[in-house]
Image (cartoon, helix red, strand yellow):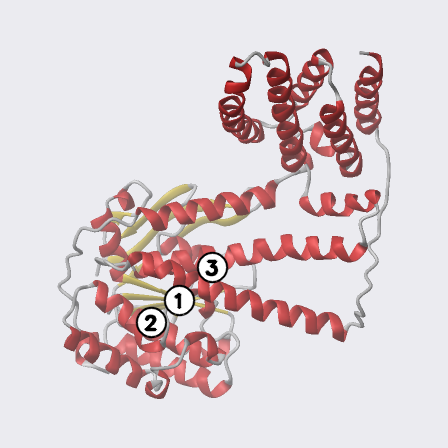
Amino acid sequence: MTNWLSKKDEYYPPKDRDLFIDKSILSVLTMMSGIRWAGKPENGVYYRINATLKFIFTFVLILLLSLSQSFQFILLCDCFIILTMGMLDAGDIKRTAIVIFIAGIFASLILLPSALMGNFHNSANLFLKIIGNLAAVNILANSTKWSHLTRSMKVIKLPDIFILVLDITIKYIFILGEYSINMLYALRLRSVGRNDRKHQSIPNLMGALFLKSKEMAELTYSAMECRGFDGRYLSSWKFRMKMEDFIYSGANFLVIALFFCI
Amino acid sequence: MNNIIELKNINYGYSSSSALKNINLGIEEGDSVAIIGPNGSGKSSLLKLMNGIIFPDSGEYLFRGKIIDSQNLNDKTFLKKFHKSIGFVFQNSDSQLFCQNVYEEIAFGPRQMQFSEDEINSRVRDCLEMLCIDHLKHREPYHLSEGEKKKVAIAAVLALNPEVLVLDEPMNGLDPRIKRFMKELLIELNKAGKTIICATHEFEYIGISYYFA
């Protein structure tokens, strides 16, 4: 055993800023908790609605919003979407509202010259369409489990292999997220002094993560081949309607009917 | 003798389950403690808590009599001193190794402590020799075997000369020869005055010198 290991170091850490490690940890954790907790059924009744129905009706609403020229219908549609947003839990409402707010600022900046030139009606329509579409997509993403969402894509006849790729992608985003969070923890635990080349650690972490993902991809492919994978994948899809699904469908059919009436 | 680590009525849980329930533990300087339990019993959570990665929902964690909580660890000087005093070897070595080669990996800590290049060289050389990985110093960490990665991870932590060494299941995935080597190394480190805390479920590699928690 070497001498220095038996003695205590007289060490006083010099001042250094390592906010970027904390910020990176926070952003990875936010992303991971988003994937993990999205669509938890206990969050509320809206979370328990069939994912396939939510996917179909969100798709239809976006389509109708894009096609409509009627200011009344667009406004009504936006009101309906905001009303559904009210059924989410506080955290998801906040997340969705932030996205809408930021997109709203950018959209209004882009549309401002057009509105000032006299195209106020079209600009207002476009602004409301952007807000409505973004809100609808965010509500769907925040209130539905990602695995249920990919499975529900079968309804628009997406090939099973595409659904498999999406499923694996989401799974590995999460697994690699856990790896990166542990790496950032390790970096923080070993950042015991002044590191002037702090930002150089990030490319190192990214490189290690890339190599890990490559290794995992190869292992997954080998494991799939060993289990008889020959390029075809069949995903099962069950469809059951509950009371909340009927109410949700009814409300959406009403909006669709209004598209043809207004 | 005063406790270097003291946990008082610690509770910690994830949103749907409780990982640690009313934990009380005192560890004196120079102790070697084995934390035994089945998978999912909260061993890793306890070690993360001891290293200030996570914080208890209730209860108190004291390191050398000072409370370790998010508020105190906001003081960066205190945080760095705390991390210097307690070294953590992760369960998965891949998460811990992020430098371009083994030498850089071990030199990462001493370099931050602003040692001279000679001192860094000497510490790295000593660690390489102690862990018998001298021949790996120019290799990339991700090309090493599991046992080699584990040795590099331990060397990288030892280079900081921590007072407490915390290891999360260090014997996982290692062959019996390396397991024996690790056991002997931990006993030697303990004899050199290091406090060793080791989470494991490998009873046969825990020496009689360990307290069981």
The reply to whether dot 2 and dot 1 touch (C-beta < 8 Å) is yes
Q: A124 or B126: nearer the eye?
A: A124
Q: Amino acid at mark 2?
A: Glu
Q: Amino acid at mark 3?
A: Ser
Q: In the image, what residue occupies the spot 49% across and 63% down?
A: A209
Query: Which quadrant, please, contains the N terminus of chain B?
Result: bottom left
Residue A130 appears left or right of B199: right
Residue B72: x %, y % from top left: 27, 43
Q: In the image, what residue occupies the spot 73% across and 17% down?
A: A69
Q: Earlier in the sequence, mark 2 or mark 3?
A: 3
Vertical placement of A79 versus B199: above or below? above
Spatial separation of the CA atoms under disc 3 and disc 1: 21 Å
Spatial separation of the CA atoms under disc 2 and disc 3: 23 Å
Q: To which residue does mark 2 refer?
A: B105
Q: To which residue does mark 1 refer?
A: B98
Spatial separation of the CA atoms under disc 2 and disc 1: 7 Å
Q: Amino acid at mark 1?
A: Phe
Residue A119 appears left or right of A147: left
